[in-house]
Image (cartoon, helix red, strand yellow):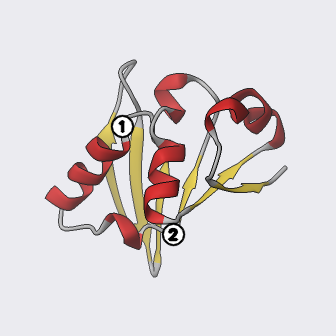
Amino acid sequence: MRILAIASGSAGNCTYIEADCSRLLIDCGISAKTASDALLSRNIAPSSIDGILITHEHPDHINGAFAFSKRFDIPIYINPPTYKAAKRVSRGAKINLFN
C-alpha cells in the first residue's frame, strides 16, 4: 500500500492511495493542474487514477475534483447528499453515487 498526501489544509486537500491494482484520490480540493503536476512529479500518471472519492462538499475537498474527472475521464464516487450540495460544479464529470 502507498499513501501520499498531495495537499492538506484549508487551501485544499488531496490524498493518493494505491493498493494492489487500485489507485484512488481521496478528495481533490486543489486545481486539476496542481493535482496532475503533483502526481507527475511522483511518477504517477494522472490518467492511471481509477477514481476520486469525495468525502464531503467543502470547497477545500472538491474544487478540482470535477475538472480532474473530466480531463482524465475518471469516475467520481460521492454520496447523494454531498453530490446534491456540490452539483453546481459537477457538469460533465462521471458521477457514481453510493450510500
Residue 1 can be seen in this image = no
* Depth order, front residue of 82/89: 89
Image coords of residue 36 (percent x, y): 29, 53
Residue lying at 68% horizontally and 30% vertically, measured from the top left: 88
* Percent position of residue 38, x then y: 22, 50
Residue position for label 1? 31
* Amino acid type, residue under disc 1 in the picture: Ser
Does 39 sit above or below residue 7?
below
Tell me the crowding category of disc 2: few under 14, some 14 to 19, or many 20 or more residues within 10 angstroms, Cα based: some
- Residue 29 place in picture, x, y as percent: 44, 34
- Mark 2, residue position: 50
In the displayed structure, 19 sits above or below 16; it is below
Position of 86 with respect to 50 (left or right) is: right
* 47 on left or right of 53: left
* Between 83 and 91, the one nearer to me in the picture: 91
- Other residues around mark 1 within 10 Å, as few (<14) / some (14–19) / many (≥20): some
Look at the picture and state if 38 lies above or below 60: below
Q: Quadrant of residue 82?
A: top right
Q: Answer with the quarter of the image where residue 66 lies.
A: top right
Q: How far apart in space, not on screen, are marks 1 and 2 (Cα)?
A: 18 Å
Quick one: 56 or 31, which is closer to the camera? Answer: 31
Q: Where is residue 87? Give x, y as percent.
A: 72, 35
Q: Amino acid at mark 2?
A: Asp
Which residue in the rendered view is the most extreme toward the left? 41
Q: Is residue 75 left or right of residue 35?
A: right
Residue 54 seen by the camera: yes
Picture quarter with the N terminus: bottom left
Looking at marks 1 and 2 on the same chain, the residue that comes earlier in the sequence is marked by 1
